[in-house]
Amino acid sequence: MKVWRFFGSATALLDAKMCCSPMAKLGFRFIVTSCRAVVLPRFGGPDVLEIHPNFEVPDLKPHQVLVRARAVSVNPLDTRMRSGYGRSIFEPLLPLILGRDISGEVAAVGGSVRSLSVGQEVFGALHPTAVRGTYADYAILSEDELTPKPLSITHVEASAIPFAALTAWRALKSTARIAKGQRLLVLGGGGAVGLTAIQLSVAVGCHVSTTCGSQSIDRVLEAGAEQAVDYTAEDPELAIKGEFDAVLDTIGAPETERLGINLLKRGGHYMTLQGEAASLTDRYGLAVGLPAATAILLKKQIQYRYSHGIEYWWTYMRADSEGLAEIRRLSEAGKLKVPVGKTFPITQVREAHKAKDKRLITGKVVLEVD
Ligand SMILES: NC(=O)c1ccc[n+]([C@@H]2O[C@H](COP(=O)([O-])OP(=O)(O)OC[C@H]3O[C@@H](n4cnc5c(N)ncnc54)[C@H](OP(=O)(O)O)[C@@H]3O)[C@@H](O)[C@H]2O)c1
């Protein structure tokens, strides 16, 4: 059950905790103090997830937005966090709420929010270390983590896009600074990040090659890849020719790292999504793990700069309002899509995580929040 506090006359449907909204000016205040949420009380398998009927909703900070969730997608980070990935950061903060992506409606805005208003349909994603995630009736995101949802896509479709697309955006635009005419290689193009990386690069005017499993060939070609190599049937080392300006490695295995680095031209960028910072801090604690991760990254950067003349990066998702605006524009134009494999009601979150863990579903898994 949600707990609501009413101030003033209570005919208003939506709220505002800030002085400048029209509702507040009229004297209406409608504040969500708790809501239903999927809570992670301890690390483990899907069965540790609990639906809590009254999980606290904290007060909004001035730059924050309260979003009534309609759909939240399941990212690999959610299932990894549930299993204990990032425990060096998250363990002291348990219980926490999983979930990065969201599509829904603005229920309230903080005092300094200018670009969004109550009732507007929005979608967006939280940064990787957020403790209060989106698997809840109401989620809190910063204004720059949200953008208006295009009318042409559903909440389910919208919720599948932002975390993956912002991860790809950061690597391609902020790190490699891809430009028209360049060649990009996506290793593991069949997943959400891979597919969004292909589509974002094609939109810039790049030529994209990719590796993926046989079931993903059609969708990577549809996304705009010019060459798709089925790594279960062909040897990518023999099949992929020429040199690339940038390589995005979504798999991050030793063999994909070797392949990607060998296919780069001098000055090119190799970017892996599987940086070791979290795994090392989990293993050795923050005090030892973080400096160890920094040292390993630095060693690899220096090593590859001298041996191959390339730039080596661990790349991470980061909120980026400019990126989100472009993601919105491309989604609206039908040029950026992430296929949804299956939806579950949020009450079946354990089943959704089981399906994701067992890789039973091709395409994104989305939780619908009624
Ligand atoms: N650093 C960051 O900030 C960041 C952000 C987002 C994601 N990630 C990581 O990037 C990876 C991809 O994320 P995503 O959202 O694109 O995931 P996803 O949508 O679940 O896709 C993963 C893809 O990996 C391929 N795959 C399947 N089984 C595999 C296996 N055993 N080993 C390797 N690959 C396999 C599949 O493609 P095919 O069927 O074509 O083989 C699958 O579609 C995940 O590991 C995720 O944790 C990192």
Image (tube, rainbow, N blue to C red):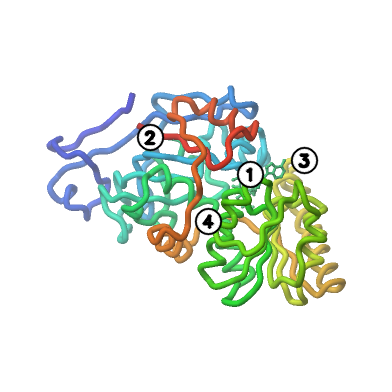
Nearest to N terminus: mark 4 or mark 3: 4
Which kind of residue does numbered mark 3 sit on? Answer: Arg
| Left or right of residue 45, residue 98 in this image | left
Task: Assign a secondary structure to mark 2.
Answer: loop
Nearest to N terminus: mark 2 or mark 1: 2
Residue bearing mark 1: 215
Q: Nearer the viewer, mark 4 or mark 2?
A: 4
Residue bearing mark 3: 283
Which label was assigned to residue 165? 4
Q: Residue at the location (38% across, 55% down)? A: 63
Q: Position of residue 257 (x, y in %)?
A: 78, 57
Q: Is residue 280 above or below residue 209?
A: above
Q: Nearer the viewer, mark 1 or mark 3?
A: 1
Q: Position of residue 157 (x, y in %)?
A: 43, 46
Q: Determine the CA span between mark 4 and mark 3.
A: 29 Å
Which kind of residue does numbered mark 4 sit on? Answer: Ala
Nearest to N terminus: mark 3 or mark 2: 2
